[in-house]
Amino acid sequence: MKHRQPEQQLQQAKKPRREHINERLLRQWLEMENIAYEREHVFCEGRRWRFDYALTKQKIAVEVEGGLWIQGRHNRAPGMIADMSKYNEAAILGWTVLRYTPQELNFAIRDLMRILGRGC
């Protein structure tokens, strides 16, 4: 097994995750509807918490919860506890957080349309 230098490990950790097709559809829909959004929005100063997608004006966040079928971070105890802290703080700060798996992210469009009053 090849040993990685710390610099190589850091560079690998900074690589963006692969984008699911439904994420691309969500981005295209937001842009088509002229809805301002930010990727990887830091919503709490002093913390490294980020939302995958944030409609900052409306304080609506869309989170993509991956790794559910492979015992990923979001469904193991430490990850779940960290997510609970993050989402509780978001609620205290007035954010609406919508959570989806990558496969169900297409429902984000439907839900955002309802919240933003653009249909059901």
Image (tube, rainbow, N blue to C red):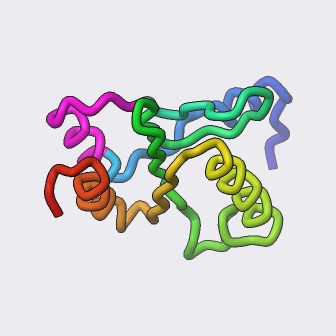
Magenta stretch containing residue 32, yes or no? yes
Which image quarter is the C terminus in?
A: bottom left
Residue at the spot 48% in from the left edge and 46% down from the top edge: 61
Left or right of 9 on screen, residue 31:
left
Q: Position of residue 26 (x, y in %)?
A: 28, 47
Residue at point 40%, 46% (across, down): 19
Lateral position of residue 2 relative to residue 112, left or right: right
Q: Can you give x and y, in whole percent of width and height, for residue 76 in the image?
A: 75, 71
Q: Which residues are magenta?
A: 24-37
In the shown orientation, is residue 75 left or right of residue 82? left
Q: Is residue 101 visible?
A: yes
Is the residue 99 above or below the residue 16 in the image? Answer: below
Q: Position of residue 102 (x, y in %)?
A: 41, 61
Q: Which residue is drawn at the image coordinates 20% and 42% (left, top)? A: 29
111 versus 12 height, above or below: below
Q: Where on the picture, by quarter, is residue 15?
A: top right
Answer whether residue 21 is visible to the viewer in this image.
Answer: no
Depicted 107 relative to depicted 17: above or below: below
Q: In this rendering, is residue 13 above or below 81? A: above
Q: Residue at x 45, y 50 (%)?
A: 62
Residue 68: which quarter of the image? bottom right
**Number of numbered callouts drawn:** 0
Asked whether, in this view, residue 11 is left or right of residue 117, the answer is right
